[in-house]
């Protein structure tokens, strides 16, 4: 009985002494790799595309392998969420800065970047809901446009 109490106390103390681990993001350290994040977005898009193609292919087989379809569906949704996280948490929260014109209105480049990022979020959401490859093409096009607008302002 004493050993059971000792184990319970040890477990309770272990949880009480745990320190949360803080992530690197949102700390103003200046360590950013914007080009790598764009490449990560492109990789997520390629994975979403492969998942959509695999789902379509598996759906046409007989007998249908529902386990594989579910695995590809979960994978597609996970990569769409990762893409959304990069857009929101990295670019919108940390990298795209509000810029105003002399008259106090938002500068065109800033508005263009936010518009493209928002459109990427919407198409990533749509990619989660469908196997329509047009969503993949839209994501690729928007990523290219955002990259051009974003890095144009970094020259």
Image (spheres, rainbow, N blue to C red):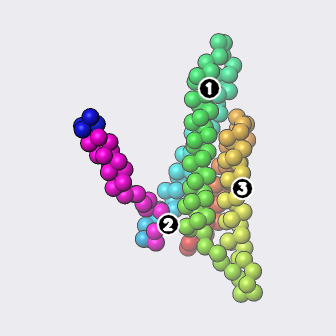
Residue at image x 49%, y 66%? 26
Q: Is residue 66 visible?
A: yes
Number of callouts: 3
Q: Which is more toward the observer, 70 or 124? A: 70
Residue at image x 52%, y 51%? 40
Residue at image x 68%, y 27%? 56
Q: Which residue is mark 1?
A: 69
Quarter holding residue 22:
bottom left
Q: Earlier in the sequence, mark 2 or mark 3?
A: 2
> What SS does tag 2 mark?
loop
- In this picture, which residue range is highlighted in magenta? 5-28
Label 2 to label 3: alpha-carbon separation: 23 Å
Q: Which is more toward the observer, 10 or 129? A: 10
Question: Mark 2 or 3, which is nearer the eye?
Answer: 2
With 110 as the anchor, is 20 left or right in this view? left
Question: Mark 1 or 2, which is nearer the eye?
Answer: 2
Q: Which residue is mark 2?
A: 26
Rendered location of residue 141, percent (x, y): 68, 52
Rendered location of residue 59, percent (x, y): 68, 22
- Mark 2 and mark 1 in contact (Cβ < 8 Å)? no
> What SS does tag 3 mark?
helix
Given the current orientation, which residue lies at the most extreme left position?
A: 3
Residue at image x 37%, y 58%? 19
Q: Which mark is residue 119?
A: 3
Rendered location of residue 144, percent (x, y): 64, 56
Q: Which mark is residue 96?
A: none
Rendered location of residue 146, percent (x, y): 64, 60
């Amino acid at each position: 009985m004493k050993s059971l109490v000792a184990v319970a106390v040890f477990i309770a103390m272990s949880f009480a002494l745990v320190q949360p681990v803080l992530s690197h993001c949102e700390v103003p350290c200046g360590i950013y790799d914007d080009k790598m994040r764009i490449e990560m977005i492109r990789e997520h898009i390629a994975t979403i595309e492969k998942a959509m193609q695999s789902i379509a292919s598996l759906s046409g087989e007989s007998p249908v392998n529902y386990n594989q379809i579910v695995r590809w569906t979960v994978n597609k949704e996970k990569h769409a969420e990762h893409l959304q996280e990069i857009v929101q948490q990295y670019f919108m929260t940390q990298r795209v800065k509000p810029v105003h014109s002399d008259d106090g209105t938002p500068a065109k480049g800033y508005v263009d970047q936010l518009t493209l990022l928002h459109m990427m979020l919407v198409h990533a959401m749509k990619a989660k809901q469908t196997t329509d490859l047009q969503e993949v093409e839209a994501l690729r096009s928007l990523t290219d446009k955002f990259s051009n607008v974003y890095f144009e302002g970094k020259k």
